Amino acid sequence: MPRAIEFTDTEFMIAQGARLIEDGKTIFVGWGIPQVVAMLAQKLYVPNVTQLFEFGAIGPQSVLPFVRGTMGGPQNTFRSLQWLNMNWAFSYSATGYMDYGMLGAAQVDPYGNINSTHLGGTFSKPGRRFPGSGGGTQVASHCWKTIIVIKHEGRRFVPKVDFLTSPGYLDGPGAREKAGLPRGTGPHRVVTSKALFGFDEATRRMTLLSVLRGLTVEEIVKDMAFRPLLAPEIGEIPPPTDDELRVLREEIDPARFIIRGEKMSATA
Amino acid sequence: MTADRIRTEGEVEYRFTHPDDFRDHVRDRKGRSPVPKLVTEKEAVSAFVSDGDYIVYDFSSLTRGPQSLIREVIRQRKKDLWIGAEFTLHESPLLVGAGCATRIDVGFLGYGNYIGQAVCDGRVKVYEWTNGGIALRILAGARGVPFLPTRDLLGTDNMKVSAAKAITDPYTGDPICLVPALNPDVAFLHVHQADVFGNARIFGTNLFALEMALASFRVIVSAEEIVETDEFRKDPMRTTVPYFLVDAVVHAPFGAYPGAMPARYEIDLEHVDRLNAIRNDEQMGRYLEENIYSVADHDEFLDRRVGAGRMRELRRRATIIEGYR
């Protein structure tokens, strides 16, 4: 029987991100939402994924619930395989051992370049200032496949980022290699609160792959400040499952600090 | 280096010391003799931190950061500091809000609205090296070399607002990024245990504790617990920093407060929320007055602003002890 599922846009974004993570692979996890995506994935889908945090936790099995704002606390270094430090953590990515990287972003452009530094104005006199790269530049440079997790707000999808913090495909095919970045790396997916994007092999431009069940392609692209390419067939993404919502709401974030957002509904 | 080998370079100010100048400092000014170095926060900061210094610290205000030392720097109203904001959270807003820091190498700029607004208002100069870039600069400082190469920062705007250079790698012929060594004036390291000579150990992960201690002109260790030297000799795999890198040792129980000290006490989220809520100078001023200026030192802060009951509760909540000892 079809029934309506109620959820927030954030919950959907986290849930569809968690479904993308492959078991038996390694993933370099960025600060904030990516941590929660990885927790949900490990809990429900990929018990054998090895997470890595930049502060030197290799293979942690985070204790739930998520402690907001923290990254290096005892909860998210629990039962690691190894405890090291930052120079060693980036060695695992620089040598090619990290299959995936997962990062948030304030802005993203058609080539998957990430801005997490500032919006508007100039670098020295910005309109709004964010924390900056952290380790995001290293994650996006070194990992084989980078997954970007970002709220589906039109103003975040821009033809050119205000500041290029972490590299996507720069200005097109071959640009990463030409700049000296490791060969064969780059953005892989953009997970939003409404849709999923990939990158076209030939042009390296962002391509709409699928949309949340019940939404139209036009609803997805209308607010974006650039027109993404469209996959030959646009897929449909089911809304969060009961299990995903239960784990998110009861185990990971009972205070609803992370998972709150715009209310949505879709047919299960 | 010939100019034609340089492909791009940022042209901003950056902290740099010739490796031989640092070696001279180590030869002439760093003691090798194991002498007791136990002092108070007040003594350590007034003896080893000067206006205009470049400061780094290991970990953050939420986890094992040297918060009692940061507060003492603010209490002593140090000026014109340049901070290496690696993985930083509330240190940068507090140091900028208190008028202590005027330049920040980012890293991670910090948490909350205050610090972002301070950058927008032009009250602090920032440079973008990224976390990996700062860690590598510190590693270069620790290895006694003038720079190290890396295959990131390339292609990004961070190259324009740091002093990183892209050159042609003489081995592969490909572009490679170089970052200059960083030898900070002062490093703050908060540890689980230290002896009076400065042998120190952390349980858990760190950012660049050993590299930072090797690379810095002066090193201040604060410790939850002071132990005998034999404790290090019985378990040498666990020594984070040996005594001869260290200039001062401060006994600082709850030195990471309001952050967590893994396996010792948990984060005080209510206090952290007050930090997060600071949006303007008036709120910043109130926080600084209440928690720093109006108390004489760390002990008085713990007694009068935190309290024994709260500390007991935070200790009780630190239930994850596996892996730490």
Image (cartoon, coloured by chain):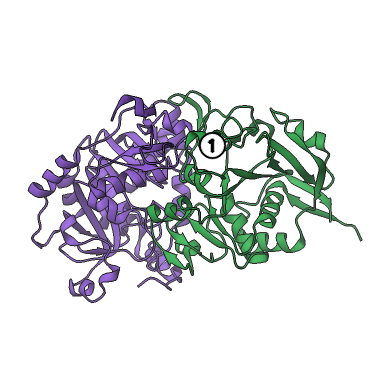
Chain colours: A green, B purple
In this rendering, does residue B214 appear at all?
A: yes
The residue lying toward the viewer, choosing from B289 and A148, is A148
User: What amino acid is at disc 1?
Assistant: Arg
Q: Secondary structure at mark 1?
A: helix
Q: Residue at x 66, y 41 (%)?
A: A151
Would residue A175 be found to the left or right of residue B212 on screen? right
Query: Which residue of the protein is positioned furthest toward the bottom in this rendering?
Result: B234
Query: Which residue of the protein is positioned furthest toward the right in this rendering?
Result: A1
Where does residue B201 sit, x and y in percent of width and height? 28, 65
10 Å crowding of disc 1: few (<14), some (14-19), many (20+): many
Check disc 1 and report the residue beneath it: A176
Would residue A83 be found to the left or right of residue B68 on screen? right
The residue lying toward the viewer, choosing from A7 and A43, is A43
Tell me the chain of label 1: A
Where does residue B247 sit, x and y in percent of width and height? 16, 53
The image quarter containing residue A72 is: bottom left
Would residue A157 be found to the left or right of residue B44 on screen? right
Where does residue B112 sit, x and y in percent of width and height? 48, 41
Q: Residue at x 37, y 53 (%)?
A: B207
Q: Residue at x 26, y 33 (%)?
A: B80
The image quarter containing residue B200 is: bottom left
Quarter that holds the N terminus of chain B: top left
Quarter that holds the C terminus of chain B: bottom left
Where does residue B267 sit, x and y in percent of width and height? 43, 59
